Image: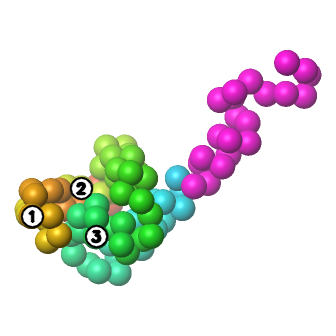
Amino acid sequence: MGNNQKAPGKGGDSDNISRQFKGTETRKIYQALAEVKQPQTRRELSKLTGLEIASLCRALWDLVHYPRTIKISHYAPCKTTGKRVMHFYFNRKGVQDGN
């Protein structure tokens, strides 16, 4: 490695792109939930945001577990598949407490 090269995963361009995209995913999720004002499944969020379900899974997991601004509202049958799925919505307590 030359003097000007960064080691992989050590703040290179791919890390910056990853962080920027993650912020975009989060912003789209927040906007979609604020717009519809009711709990949504991953499939519904995918349609509203234009993000793939696989991308939503990681973003939602992060939002449910780290800043805790999104919560699993309830489990109910999916309107499309009929399978029991999670519905996500804002965690009012997490937003107010800053957790």
SS label for mark 1: loop
Amino acid on which disc 1 is placed: Gly
SS label for mark 3: helix
Q: Nearer the viewer, mark 3 or mark 2?
A: 3
Asked where in the image residue 93 lies, by quadrant, the reply is bottom left
Amino acid on which disc 3 is placed: Glu
Residue that mark 3 sits on = 44
Q: Residues within 10 Å of mark 3 (few under 14, many from 20)?
A: some
Question: In screen coordinates, is 21 left or right of 88?
Answer: right
Residue 33 pos. (x, y %): 32, 72
Question: In screen coordinates, is 8 left or right of 98?
Answer: right
Q: Which mark is residue 82?
A: 1
Q: Residues in magenta? A: 1-21
**Residue shown at the point (37%, 75%) measured from the top left:** 48
Gap between marks 1 and 2, in whole Å? 21 Å
Mark 3 or mark 2, which has the lower sequence index? 3
Residue 87 pos. (x, y %): 19, 62
On whether residue 98 falls in the magenta region, the answer is no
Q: Which mark is residue 71?
A: 2
**Residue shown at the point (69%, 27%) measured from the top left:** 8
Residue 11 seen in the figure: yes
Q: Residues within 10 Å of mark 2 (few under 14, many from 20)?
A: many
